[in-house]
């Protein structure tokens, strides 16, 4: 059969990005922006990044197929990844059509691993099952993707029967990379020469109205938790299958979880471009000049002192950092709130950014005020510290987040409380 895996070369050679040169495809800026915009419609930070990669994989695969096999027609407008309610639950590209074949595309970002993670739904739920499962290597920094392997549904079933893969906690299967055929030309040969009915797909089961009703009742009781937790932490695997087969419930879960992201965002990522978004401008934020010590000394004396004190405590601010400030005023006095950000890591698996918050009284007579600083993410309190005498030490906090993750800052000064709209570092500006 022409879809059998090719003989496997030495694994280190197979997993070398350079070995994928024949299928490497350049991503355009428009494609990166399309994927980034989609990711902003996803509510949980961890899922957001995976959806971003999956969207790049879909766009890159479509470009590769158009370049290499223009005779094959790919249709992806109905793919799950372009439906935010489904992408919010499954970070895979299901229901891609290439002529008469159904494909499922999954992104990976680390060729050093000997395995790849697939959502269980793409195998276990008939609506998402595919003739071929295509693994796409995404190198976002280089703006490239490559076809790194594929297998068909019947091969998966045979391998699963012999290996008895266990479901992971997050409802994924971890598949050995040796299950995949690493030759992209073999995939094109299958798509051109094989008949779709040569690969038998599962059929949709009968109506599940009773289980839908029970699940709907349970989801209603979990409504507040859906805002901050992935569904695999709240439902059983069988309940998850029921959910994914009910479009009405899928949309309801998406709308409920959207409530957490309705608040205006201060996009600190724009600060690296020397820009302020509308929310920051309306709240009176002002960009600081270069954060080098020489630049600060004359233009921002207060923060120069803060930075010097922080460095004495081992807190280093890189030259690439950018910051902004705003004044918090109440009847008894005023504070200056500083926020500084920089990129910590651009690794595909864990891109991270830093947010540094610092407070400075604006009048010497305010040194004895009671200050309190709190920082929360979407699920928990990350930092809380109080200070009675602001002349004793710098009140500051540092938090690290993934791109797209948000942080809420609350400042209390005497009896005044200031709740700051969430800070975020959005993908679209990178």
Image (tube, helix red, strand yellow):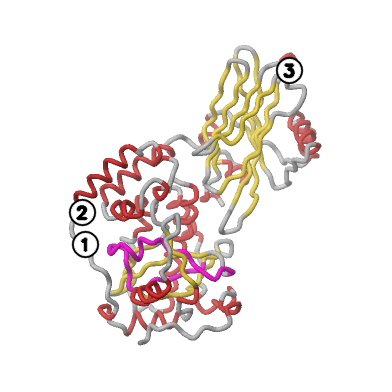
Instruction: Let me know if residue 41 appears in the view.
Output: no
Describe the element under mark 3 as helix, strand or loop. loop
Residue located at (76% from left, 27% from top)? 393
Real-space Cα separation, disc 2 to disc 1, in angstroms: 8 Å
Instruction: Let me know if residue 14 appears in the view.
Output: yes
Can you give x and y, in whole percent of width and height, for residue 81 in the image? 38, 58
Residue corresponding to mark 2:
208
Left or right relative to 153: residue 420: right
Can you give x and y, in whole percent of width and height, for residue 216 in the image? 27, 43
Real-space Cα separation, disc 3 to disc 1, in angstroms: 70 Å
Whichever of labels 3 and 1 marks the residue nearer the N terminus, that label is 1
For label 1, the crowd category at 10 Å Cα-Cα, with few meaning under 14, some 14 to 19 and many 20 or more, is few
Left or right relative to 357: residue 283: left
Describe the element under mark 1 as helix, strand or loop. loop
Whichever of labels 2 and 3 marks the residue nearer the N terminus, that label is 2
Using the image as rendered, state which of residue 242 and residue 348 is in the foreground.
Answer: 242
Q: Is residue 226 above or below residue 393?
A: below
Can you give x and y, in whole percent of width and height, for residue 340 in the image? 66, 39
Mark nearer the viewer, 3 or 1: 1
For label 3, the crowd category at 10 Å Cα-Cα, with few meaning under 14, some 14 to 19 and many 20 or more, is some
Describe the element under mark 2 as helix, strand or loop. loop
In contact (CB < 8 Å): disc 2 and disc 1:
yes
Residue located at (49% from left, 47% from top)? 45
Q: Which mark is residue 205?
A: 1
Q: How many marks?
A: 3
Q: Is residue 364 above or below residue 32?
A: above
Q: Which mark is residue 367?
A: 3
Bounds of the magenta segment:
112-137
Q: Quadrant of residue 284?
A: top right
- Tell me, yes or no, whether the highlighted magenta stretch contains residue 147: no
Residue located at (51% from left, 36% from top)? 278
């Amino acid at each position: 059969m022409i879809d059998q895996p090719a003989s496997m070369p030495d694994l280190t050679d197979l997993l070398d990005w350079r070995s994928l040169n024949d299928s490497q495809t350049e991503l355009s800026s428009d494609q990166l922006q399309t994927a980034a915009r989609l990711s902003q419609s996803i509510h949980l930070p961890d899922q957001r990044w995976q959806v971003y990669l999956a969207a790049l994989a879909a766009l890159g695969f479509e470009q590769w197929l158009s370049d290499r096999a223009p005779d094959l027609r790919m249709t992806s407008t109905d793919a799950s990844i372009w439906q935010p309610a489904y992408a919010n639950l499954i970070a895979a590209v299901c229901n891609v059509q290439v002529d008469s074949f159904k494909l499922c595309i999954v992104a990976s970002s680390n060729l050093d691993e000997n395995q790849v993670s697939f959502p269980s739904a793409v195998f276990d739920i008939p609506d998402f099952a595919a003739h071929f499962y295509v693994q796409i290597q995404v190198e976002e920094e280089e703006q490239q993707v490559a076809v790194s392997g594929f297998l068909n549904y019947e091969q998966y079933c045979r391998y699963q029967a012999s290996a008895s893969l266990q479901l992971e906690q997050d409802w994924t299967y971890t598949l050995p990379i040796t299950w995949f055929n690493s030759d992209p030309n073999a995939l094109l040969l299958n798509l051109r020469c094989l008949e779709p009915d040569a690969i038998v797909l599962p059929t949709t089961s009968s109506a599940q109205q009773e289980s839908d009703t029970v699940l709907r009742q349970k989801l209603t009781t979990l409504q507040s938790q859906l805002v901050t937790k992935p569904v695999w932490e709240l439902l059983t695997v069988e309940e998850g299958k029921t959910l994914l087969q009910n479009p009405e419930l899928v949309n309801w879960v998406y709308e409920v979880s959207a409530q957490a992201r309705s608040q205006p965002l201060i996009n600190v990522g724009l600060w690296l471009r020397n820009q302020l978004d509308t929310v920051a401008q309306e709240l009176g934020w002002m960009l600081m000049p270069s954060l080098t010590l020489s630049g600060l000394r004359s233009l921002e004396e207060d923060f120069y002192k803060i930075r010097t004190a922080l460095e004495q405590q081992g807190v280093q601010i890189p030259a690439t950092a950018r910051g902004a400030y705003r004044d918090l005023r109440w009847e008894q006095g005023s504070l200056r709130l500083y926020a500084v950000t920089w990129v910590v890591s651009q690794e595909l698996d864990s891109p991270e950014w830093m947010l540094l918050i610092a407070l400075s009284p604006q009048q010497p007579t305010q040194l004895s005020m009671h200050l309190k600083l709190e920082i929360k993410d979407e699920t928990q309190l990350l930092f809380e510290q109080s200070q009675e005498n602001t002349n004793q030490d710098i009140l500051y906090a540092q938090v690290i987040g993934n791109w797209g993750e948000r942080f809420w800052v609350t400042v209390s000064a005497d009896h005044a409380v200031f709740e700051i709209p969430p800070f975020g570092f959005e993908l679209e500006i990178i």
